[in-house]
Image (spheres, helix red, strand yellow):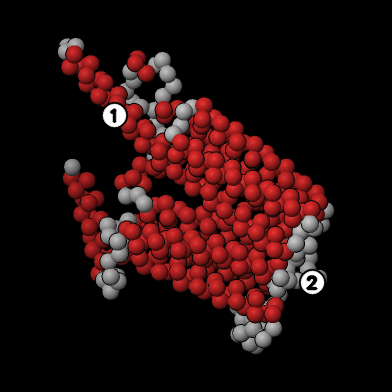
Amino acid sequence: MEGSHGRELSREIRLGGVNKTFSWIPPVSPAIFTRLAEASLVFVVANILSGAAVRLTGSGLGCPDWPTCYHHRLVAADAFHPLMEFGNRIFVIAVVVVAIATLLAALARRPYNKELIKRSASLVGGVIGEAIVGGIVVLSHLNPYAVAAHFLYAMVLATQALLIVHCSRHTPEELARLRVPLQAPTSRSSLLDSKVSPLRLYRRALLWSFGAISLIAAILVAGAGATGAGPHAGAPNVVRFHVPFDDLIHLHALIATSAGLVVVAYAFLLHKWHFSWRVQRRVWLLISVMAIQGAIGVTQYLLHVPADLVELHILGATTVWIIAVWQHLQLKVEAHNATEKEEAGMRATASSVVETFPL
């Protein structure tokens, strides 16, 4: 009890310090913070599309220097390619501003949630880091490895922004429970031996979900590799991957097909295991978006990779990734809820048995 009281007192002291330091910020409600977190996610995704547009319009070296546009000039010349690249840099500043606003809102949010502060701070640092990686892309003259790393880094940022939205909808206590690995109920009842427990089914579902996410991540990596060998280099006369573009596209398609089959199998297993329609619906949404994304990919390949379809394909890839991670997070929440419900049911059964057959 004394240890618990000490930890609580320590927390109150730290919180008091935070309150004094940021007392100039008006208190923020959980609902307002969630809206800001969602705005951060939208801006991060828009930044991915903005960066893709720079490359697809051949404006990657519109500003040949960094952080200034030219060696002795900050802003871009009045021409299409420099303005495209410089406009993207300005938009990154907007993303940083929104991320900082989210961090300040996390500090002012009531009730206090340390997890949101840490994640919001990491998002601010991550966006600044992405800008630096973008500078490396320019200074390396659009080296394909740097371009691929820049895209994958942006997807990590989108994941972090999504996690902030997810965490904003849960209390610190709920988030602490979610970090604990799923445990088998401590009490057992012979009444449950004749059927598979919900916990076991959720464990199986989470395994399938993680497998699907892993394959989708592999799709993103393969797609970034195909970009490094494709026709849209971002500027003339830049280094490309010394691998045939068609070979990388076929590898990308093979992984995408495998991922699609795994997700469809995952959906049918959820149906077989009698998961709620709420859970199944999220996976069928993922299947639908993946099917549309696959159709866009095939079409752009047959049409010799037009820039507008490539931009749409990048939007599709980002959407698929976000939905895949989102459904996994929601499934994990429901798995923990099912565990608690199962343990409560077992405790009630045990209590009933004791009352019926007292020792």
What residue is shown at x 36% (from left), y 51% (from top)? Answer: 169
Give the secondary structure at mark 1.
Answer: helix
Q: Is residue 210 visible?
A: no
Q: Is residue 335 left or right of residue 13?
A: right
x, y percentage for residue 58? 73, 71
Q: Is residue 114 above or below residue 334?
A: below
x, y percentage for residue 115? 37, 54
Q: Which residue is mark 1?
A: 344
Q: Is residue 253 visible?
A: yes
x, y percentage for residue 345? 29, 26
Task: Compare residues 187 and 236 and report the one nearer the observer.
Answer: 236
Earlier residue among tags 1 and 2: 2
User: Which quarter shows the N terminus?
Assistant: top left
User: Which quarter shows the C terminus?
Assistant: top left
- The 10 Å Cα crowd at callout 1, few under 14, some 14 to 19, many 20 or more, is some
Q: CA distance from mark 1 to mark 2?
A: 65 Å
What residue is shown at x 53% (from left), y 59% (from top)? Answer: 157
Q: Is residue 308 left or right of residue 343?
A: right
Give the secondary structure at mark 2.
Answer: loop
What residue is shown at x 37% (from left), y 33% (from top)? Answer: 338
Q: Is residue 254 above or below residue 75?
A: above
Residue 264 location, quadrant: top right
Q: Is residue 161 above or below residue 188?
A: below
Q: Which mark is residue 187?
A: none
x, y percentage for residue 221? 66, 51
Three-letter code for the amino acid on which mark 2 is drawn: Pro
Q: Is residue 126 above or below residue 324?
A: below
- The 10 Å Cα crowd at callout 2, few under 14, some 14 to 19, many 20 or more, is few
What residue is shown at x 33% (from left), y 26% (from top)? Answer: 186
Question: Across the whole image, how many numbered discs are drawn on residues?
Answer: 2
Q: Which residue is mark 2?
A: 236
Three-letter code for the amino acid on which mark 1 is drawn: Ala
